[in-house]
Image (spheres, rainbow, N blue to C red):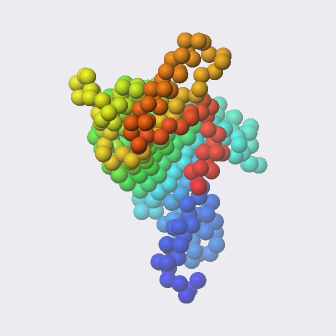
Amino acid sequence: MDAIPPEIWSEIFSFACTDDGSTGRALSRVSRAVQIISKSSKYQSICVLGPNQLLKLFGLLSALSPRARKVKYLFVACLDECAEFGGADHGAQTIRQFYLNTEMNATGQALEQLLQLVSPSLVALQIHRTKIYRQSVLLDMEFPVLSELTLHGPFKSTDPRPPECLFPNLRRIHIHHFVHHPTQFLQQIVRVAPKITHLHVPQRSFSAYDIQVALGILQPIVSSSELSQLPDSLQQLVIELEPAPSSLDSWASNIRGEQHRRKFHKISQRDARIRLADGRDDWIPVVEAKERWIS
């Protein structure tokens, strides 16, 4: 090891620490020399599952200096399906106790404070299967270097005009499974992330009219202040279509669903940037989401 400069080892460790945090923890136990050299990469990539890990990580990072807590890649999945990862020390019974005893407000505050700690260095963030309501379409805090954001779960859109350019370097946005759909969904995204290149959203996020105006296919018939065009930087828009109508649905529901699907198919033929994807009416399991994130 002495034959290679520490700076080279540091780069190697940085490339190695892109999993759920296991590699960083393992390197810190190899030797004192490796522990010191790999220290800057130890928390580079972290996976947090459940409120217990969330609170432990927050306490750990709070005790470190800003230079030592540079988290670049963060995956958070709170409460749902955490029992899948329960071991001898954190079995299903323990998970149930955390679920019952942890207040959602307290967990939400811990998540917000954790994100504030790591926001200066965060490059990629995925928040998956959480019942914590966020207050905006994306997140209402500044992430100066964040380039990729994936959000699964509900939000309450209380502020129709969030601060501008909270995500100056955000390029890829994937939003999935939320309940409340604001009337100014696209406007909020363009306002806070003006340089997006890839956007993946559910069909119900907007009407066929709204997306045609946003893409410049149609001219707006209302005030331009109420609608926004997507930026020229956009390279791909993936629209996750609603699941195909079921035989159990009402006749009227089937007709409406099919009409909406046809409208979006026609729109996709007019703009090569649009790709249609079949929607999933069930939640993506935490295990699958974690594997995608690591890969």
Residue at 49% across, 78% down = 8
Q: Is residue 246 visible?
A: yes
Q: Is 143 drawn above or below residue 212 in the view shown?
A: below
Left or right side of 108 for 219: left
Whole-percent x, y for residue 290 in the image: 61, 48
Q: Is 164 drawn above or below residue 168 in the view shown?
A: above
Left or right side of 243 for 201: left
Image quarter where the C terminus lies is: bottom right
Whole-percent x, y for residue 19 in the image: 59, 58
Instruction: Determine the residue located farthest toward the bottom in the rendered image.
Output: 3
In depth, the one of 42 and 75 nearer the eye is: 75
In depth, the one of 168 and 100 nearer the eye is: 168
Residue at 60% across, 68% down = 28
Residue at 64% across, 69% down = 29
Q: Is 183 drawn above or below residue 193 in the view shown?
A: above
Whole-percent x, y for residue 268 in the image: 43, 36
In depth, the one of 36 and 160 nearer the eye is: 160
Whole-percent x, y for residue 110 in the image: 50, 41
Image quarter where the N terminus lies is: bottom right
